[in-house]
Image: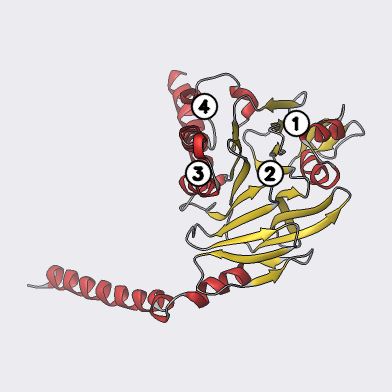
Amino acid sequence: MKRRVITAVVLAATIVGLLAHVGLGCTSFAVYAGKPLYGMNFDYPPNEILFSIEDHEAGALFVGSFWMGEYYAKTVGMNEHGLFASDQMVYPARAMVDEPGEDEVFIWNAFYDGLGQCTSVDEVLTWIGDRRVVQYQTLQLHNLYADPTGNAMVVECGAENVVTEIDRPFIVMTNFHNGDFVGLPLRDIAGVGGERYRVAHRYIEENLADFDVDHGFEVLHRSSQGTGDFKTRYSLVFDPIALEIYIALERDYEHIWKVSLTDRTIETYRGFAEHHVLPLDETGVTGPTLQSYVDAAKPAAENDATGVRWPLLALIGAGLLGIALWLVLKP
């Protein structure tokens, strides 16, 4: 019996470890230091990504999306009032339903409709009202909301809605239930995304005095994922006062794009030899389109490096294999 218990515990730990490594991703934050800034890493398999500006009841809305096979799924955004929300995977699953009831609302709708209809975190809470936020059976999520006044919260599903309010000059969300660890020391944070949470938390805390866009990207760089199935596809830093969004693609923090929510444009901002400005509307611009400007700016030798490297490695490998076979087969 004891052996079965130990085996079950080891198996459970292994499953959680695998989920932490390849099953889930994304890190987001809101910081209130010199000026409010938000950030998000979107971690996902290599599906096409899209950035767009839509029109809603609350006004213009910048959205980051990814291709789901039949449509672009929206996962992060900021509207013209500086209200930000990110929608990320959470583990374990809670409050799963086949369809929301009359007194329930799917948590993804709380993310997207909240951005489209509300101007502040308090308005999001009013919009949710007495309804319970729930999950569909195949999709488990939680939401981070923030606005320029310093108000921020994480909303999660449960028997009742779990709202974790900001209790310091910043708030971080990864993939565990924030509501499970309120008031606990940082070392006691556990669950999927726990280490990314600690990395982001520590860096922000240590750099609050002069926290800026560059610090925002450093947080995202340090908490990015470069291995496993859920690599970091894009990193975003949001300035809700200037209504600007800064974008790094595929963990490349040398080439940065800037979106103006007011002008409805996306332009090269840092690391490009030439300046380009593109219109940004509801049709949007894809990651490959933006990446083509990065590739065009690279020297020909750098662009061809991958094509040269693999044949060379293959030739070296064949030579080593030939030597090994000769040593084995020689009399």
3D distance between C-alphas at marks 4 and 3:
18 Å
Q: Is residue 62 left or right of residue 296?
A: right
Indicate the position of residue 319 as horizontal and vertical percent values.
22, 75
Disc 3 crowd, CA 10 A, few/some/many (<14, 14-19, 20+): many
Query: Do the residues under discs 4 and 3 have CB atoms within 8 angstroms?
Result: no
3D distance between C-alphas at marks 4 and 1:
22 Å
Callout in the foreground (4, 1): 4
Residue indicated by mark 3: 219
List the single residue furthest toward the right: 102
Q: Is 3 or 227 nearer to us in this picture?
A: 227
Query: Which structural element holds mark 4?
Result: loop
Indicate the position of residue 171 as horizontal and vertical percent values.
60, 33
Q: In the figure, residue 275 lies in which quadrant?
A: bottom right
List the single residue furthest toward the bottom: 300
Query: Any mark on residue 95, and which?
Result: 1
**Residue at left 66%, top 71%?**
277
Q: Is 276 or 189 nearer to us in this picture?
A: 276
Q: Earlier in the sequence, mark 3 or mark 2?
A: 2
Query: Any mark on residue 86, and which?
Result: 2
Q: In the figure, residue 184 lies in which quadrant?
A: top right
Callout in the foreground (1, 2): 2
The kind of residue on which mark 3 rests is Val
